[in-house]
Image (spheres, rainbow, N blue to C red):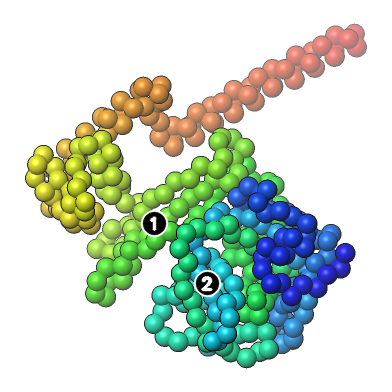
Amino acid sequence: MNTQSQIVTMESLFQLAGINYNDLQENTEINIEEKNIKIKSYNIETNEVEFKPIVRLMRKEDSEMYEVNAGLGSFCFKGTPEHKIYIKDKGYMTLNDIYNTKEMLYCLVDNFKYELVLIKKVEGKFPVLDMTVQDNGNYFSEKILSKNSPEKIGVGEAMKFYASVRIKTSKAEQQKDDGEEGQSSVDVVMSVFKNKVGIPFRKAQFTLLSGVNGKYGIDTQKEIIEYAVKYDIIKKAGSWFSYEDNKIGQGVNNVKKYLDENPVLFENIKKQVSNLAEGERAKLNLKSESFNDKIDQAIEDSKETKRRRKKEDESETNTDNNNIE
């Protein structure tokens, strides 16, 4: 089959390839090079439109979507917040950045004209379908020039087969303070979509501080507050938090400020959370081990395996010598 595709939707592309995306798990890739399906692409070096082969199709994690329109015409397509399209005088921008900007932006369409881009957020989450295009790394999605998958790792095809664990890291929501301080933190979502040494498809979320007021790294204080609410150490009613019948703030940020001003109280809450967490681990027969402890144990296990193999090799050598005699 040799097909040049003027794709109407990603769903129609999957249908053209004979794949039902509803049957695929999240974070699944399928190589379709042999089907020789091509899509309209743009060669920046020659300034020409080309039809390039689609290498693979992917179903990713369900995500919120933006509805994208070019000009004042009809609806074009839906894309994730990370989907990139080409914007005049700015290059490729994500739909999320375009949605949050206040200026009028113009996107490049397949007749090499620029059209006003209009974006609105769609309620709910939807299946995310994506593809990898050969060479140029871009394609015209419903006539708008789009960038190829930003999650593609530039190390060839070996990584997904060689790696024992693959973790996708994505940005969930960023917090912005008033004034000129800018972004203070970002919520990070980590999804394990390959794990040969443990249970795959687990997710974790944490808040990463960006350095405002000299605070960097994982926001452990926020985690302590969340667990304190879980263990009923801190009471929460609406947006208000209270400790021992005393209100300590409205909203997590104000609670954090209160605890910064009262370090003794914070240490007391932290100790209570730690004791209750240890109690839960004890019920599940889980040991409280650090990452370094596990690494040391893995090294010791590896040494023991090598010693055992060496003894087995020596035993086989002695047996062979006896047989020769």
Kind of residue at badge 1: Asp
Please tell me in which quadrant of the rendered image residue 6 appears: bottom right
Quarter in which the N terminus is drawn: bottom right
| Residue 60 placement, left or right of 292 | right
Nearest the viewer among 287 and 241 is 241
Q: Which residue is at a point 59% across and 28% down the rendered structure image?
A: 302
Disc assigned to residue 67: 2
**Along the line of sight, which residue is nearer the eye, 36 or 161?**
36
Q: Residues within 10 Å of mark 1 (few under 14, many from 20)?
A: some
Residue plotted at (20% across, 37% down): 233
The answer to whether 140 appears left or right of 253 in the picture is right
Task: Tell me the quarter of the picture where residue 4 sits.
Answer: bottom right
Identify the residue shown where x is 52% and y is 72%. 67
Chain-order first, disc 1 or disc 2: 2
Given the current orientation, which residue lies at the most extreme left position?
246
Q: Residue at x 58, y 65 (%)?
A: 150
Q: Is residue 58 left or right of residue 201?
A: right
- Residue 187, which numbered label? 1
Q: Is residue 322 above or below residue 128?
A: above
Alpha carbon distance from label 1 to label 2: 24 Å
Give the amino acid at mark 2. Answer: Glu
**282 or 299: nearer the viewer:** 282
Whether residue 84 appears in this view of the structure is yes
- Secondary element under disc 2, as helix, strand or loop, is strand
> Which label sits in the foreground, 1 or 2?
2
How crowded is the residue under tag 2: few (<14 C-alpha within 10 Å), some, or many (20+)? some
In the image shown, does 323 or 197 lie closer to the viewer? 197
Residue 14's disc is none
**What x and y, as percent, mark residue 36?**
83, 65
Image quarter of the C terminus: top right
Residue at the bottom extreme of this rendering: 113
